[in-house]
Amino acid sequence: MHILITGAAGMVGRKLAERLLNDGRIGQREITKLTLHDIIAPDTQPTENTSIRPIVGDLSDRSVVERLVAEKPDIVVHLAAIVSGEAESDFEKGYGTNFDGIRYLLEALRRQHYQPRVVYASSIAVYGTPFPEPIPDDFHLTPLTSYGTQKAVGELLLNDFTRRGFFDGIGLRLPTICVRPGKANKAASGFFSNIIREPLKGEEAVLPVAETVRHWHASPRAAVGFFMHAIGMDLEPVGPRRCLTMPGVAATVGEQIEALRNVAGDKAVALIRRQPDPVVAGIVSGWPTAFEARRARDLGFTADADFQAIVRTHIEDEHGGRAPIMD
Amino acid sequence: MHILITGAAGMVGRKLAERLLNDGRIGQREITKLTLHDIIAPDTQPTENTSIRPIVGDLSDRSVVERLVAEKPDIVVHLAAIVSGEAESDFEKGYGTNFDGIRYLLEALRRQHYQPRVVYASSIAVYGTPFPEPIPDDFHLTPLTSYGTQKAVGELLLNDFTRRGFFDGIGLRLPTICVRPGKANKAASGFFSNIIREPLKGEEAVLPVAETVRHWHASPRAAVGFFMHAIGMDLEPVGPRRCLTMPGVAATVGEQIEALRNVAGDKAVALIRRQPDPVVAGIVSGWPTAFEARRARDLGFTADADFQAIVRTHIEDEHGGRAPIMD
């Protein structure tokens, strides 16, 4: 079995590739090859059983897309995207990769006439305020960013191309990934991860919003689990509405902080510095807070148990089970 | 004031152009020019006060689109589309005009940097079964045709480009237009019009579905009224969700027939021949039956009073007030 991952050098892409290499198989079928695409060369290493073919290039370039699908991978996991902040600040770049790119990719797959499975990373950014709480599965998509718009367009194309029989698609609306490993980043959503990750390293983190802010989270491990499930599951019961809001953990910032306290103690929590930022608070106030995600749960997608589990998962995956602050 | 209409040789386009020429103005502003685009030359005639510039060409050709916007029309009414049946039978043609075409048009307007008003014809085909009855304004878009998918993509782009300030857009999800003038056509929806129009001419019409089938209708005159309202209204109160389901008349086929009887008598109704067609019945069973359309009504869009009014409007507009069967 040959699997293509676009955006394979990103955080979820790397973790998914590692999981696929570790498992070595999907059900009864061996994974013999991974094609790993990104704008930089992914550093994932091949194994005895699974070779790796790296492809470096931009999806807004149609010839790059043609190379990706030329060998007819059995599974296509489409993660590559210009992220929310950049798609907003650079209009043409965002539409180039997130709109033209997915059109080129789906169109190239159609022209290969071989009906692979396509797993598409969408986002809860397809929803914008106002909405009910929790948001039900049949609520309309109301993106308030170009990124959310582009993701919603991808969902529509995925549904139509699947209905047409060009491939067998499934789209996953990912929650905000928390705790993101790596460095603190400046995305408006960065603080959700920063206030957990940095204190666990013994470092200070800035909290720019009120503790009452509520949001929808999934750990990187849960996100990889969503993709693994989507790669292996029976798609027949999904029906024609192929894009699903993934289950997650709805938590207020206050609940995040209590989870950190329960896992790592007061010393960690003391490293969170309140520094209200009205700009960040304004952006975040338009974001979804909680979802029903009933269809995805019924189809076997599973979320983290609660926010404390998310903190523990981060410590297991990034600190080998024990964070510096706990020593 | 200069108004561009794409698809101006179509039924709604022709009627809208005539209405604009008759009125001669939008509010206080005179209409000095109409640019009328279609794949064939529109036969609408200019008046002393309003010149007409015809442009013939395909919207999937970027250079045609550039010519449409080069003179920076104040209002752009985008009606051009490959219709539902053809977009389904000819995949590439449908995506070429309905997907690439709207992208090119909106992008060309963005690059002109002058923020015109854009009025976009969407369709209730953005909804597909299953759905609640009536469908509320916040129900998700679930197209089950390529045409509906392409219309929904256009809605997303219109919202995002408006939010970005590139132009001031509004999208109208049109009901099925009934009674369509002209010849009986073979579209799956054709019978809704045929069973009224043909008997009024004293000719037989075939009814392929049960009388219990319910659907959402607007007369051509009401449809033109939606566009006139959208061209002249204040768009500020619409907010960021720029695409609205237009109000209409929910009527069963049985109610349509009773309306025909009330207006034109038993002799007209006797010309409807029942000839069940399981294929047509199957297609129609996936179509929406009724909508709340609350936002559009609150914003001043008005529907026909009932189906009897739709029949009378047809007789006024197409038969000068008295149909052949009534003589």
Image (cartoon, coloured by chain):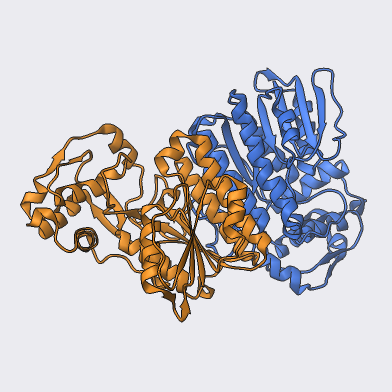
Chain colours: A orange, B blue
Residue pictured at 91% horizontal, 59% vertical: B203
Work out whether residue B177 can be spotted. Answer: no
Residue farthest toward the bottom in the current orientation of the protein: A28
Task: Judge from the rendering whether residue A31 lies leftward or rightward of residue B1; answer left or right.
Answer: left
Residue B290 x/y as whole percent: 60, 57
The part of the image, by quadrant, that contains residue A217 is bottom left
Residue A224 x/y as whole percent: 37, 63
Residue B267 x/y as whole percent: 88, 62
Which quadrant of the rendered structure holds the C terminus of chain A? bottom left
Task: Judge from the rendering whether residue B198 lies leftward or rightward of residue A282; answer left or right.
Answer: right
Residue pictured at 56% horizontal, 44% vertical: A60
Q: Of B62 and B178, which appears nearest the observer? A: B62
Task: Judge from the rendering whether residue A179 lies leftward or rightward of residue B131; answer left or right.
Answer: left
Q: Of A272 and A294, which appears nearest the observer? A: A272
The part of the image, by quadrant, that contains residue B145 is bottom right
Residue pictured at 86% horizontal, 60% vertical: B268
The part of the image, by quadrant, that contains residue A271 is top left
Work out whether residue A61 can be spotted. Answer: yes
How many marks the image carries: the answer is 0
Task: Judge from the rendering whether residue B76 lies leftward or rightward of residue B200; answer left or right.
Answer: left
As displayed, is residue B80 above or below residue B285?
above
Q: Of A140 and B238, which appears nearest the observer? A: A140
